[in-house]
Amino acid sequence: MNTVQVKDKQFALYISEEKLLNRVKEVAEQLNADLAGKNPLFLVVLNGSFVFAADLLRDITIPCEITFVRVASYEGTSSTGEIKQLLGLTQDIKGRTVVIVEDIIDTGFTMKELLHMLEEKNPAEIHITSLLVKPGNLKVDLNIPYRCFDIENDFIVGYGLDYDHEGRNLRHIYQVVE
Ligand code: IMP
Ligand code: MG
């Protein structure tokens, strides 16, 4: 299937499932090597990361813990605009090695805010792994060594990522056809 329709848009095959799985395994092996003995806590950021996390974490072979969080945004009552909050983190992360598992880093604002919220809880270290990064859109300074693919700025869907709530279950990643 080289093109799919999701709602009102056409999408073309961009990264195949096979390519995704091969690269995800490489990144998992890097994490296994770098974080051995640290009993990392993987923080999977829902919803978009669920497919990436399921594949990545089954290739993690070192002792680790896995939990799921959500970053919710709501409009502030003042002119400060959008405020983000962290939902679902029940573990104490003080002194822990934390690995944030994200689907995509676009402007990077979500990740930057998440980092601030986690740093207040005094973990020993925070690493970021992201399936996708759009370097052309990145607006903040972020260190993302465990990234699987750098992609163009165009909108993509599939392998967990949605277009208006649909398309998360597509096996491959597809790019919008303008
Ligand atoms: P950021 O704060 O701009 O980095 O936005 C990150 C969030 O935007 C991701 O977690 C996604 O939910 C969403 N996003 C950004 N680009 C795409 C895309 O191409 N497809 C689907 N969702 C996207
Ligand atoms: Mg996300």
Image: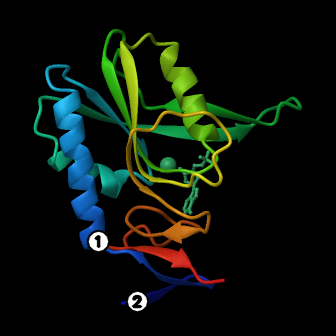
The picture places residue 75, in percent across and down from the top left corner, at 76, 39
The amino acid marked with disc number 1 is: Glu
Q: In which quarter of the image is residue 48?
A: bottom left
Residue 90 higher or lower than 161, as above or below: above
In the rendered structure, the answer to whether residue 61 lies left or right of residue 100 reads left
Question: Which one is nearer the viewer's eye here, 176 or 148?
Answer: 148
Q: Which of marks 2 and 1 is nearer the N terminus?
A: 2
Rendered residue at 45%/38% (across/down):
144
In the rendered structure, the answer to whether residue 176 lies left or right of residue 129 reads right
Give the numbered dot on residue 129: none
Work out how far the residue at label 2 is from the one at label 1, CA to CA, in angstroms. 12 Å
Neighbourhood count class around disc 1 (C-alpha, 10 Å): few under 14, some 14–19, many 20 upward: some
Secondary element under disc 2, as helix, strand or loop, is loop
- Is residue 55 shown to the viewer in this render? no
Residue 143 higher or lower than 122, as above or below: below
The amino acid marked with disc number 2 is: Asn
Rendered residue at 33%/9% (across/down):
95
- Is residue 68 shown to the viewer in this render? yes
The picture places residue 33, in percent across and down from the top left corner, at 17, 33
Quarter of the image with the C terminus in it: bottom right
Residue 14 higher or lower than 34, as above or below: below
Residue sticking out furthest to the right: 79
Query: Which residue in the protein does label 2 denote?
Result: 2
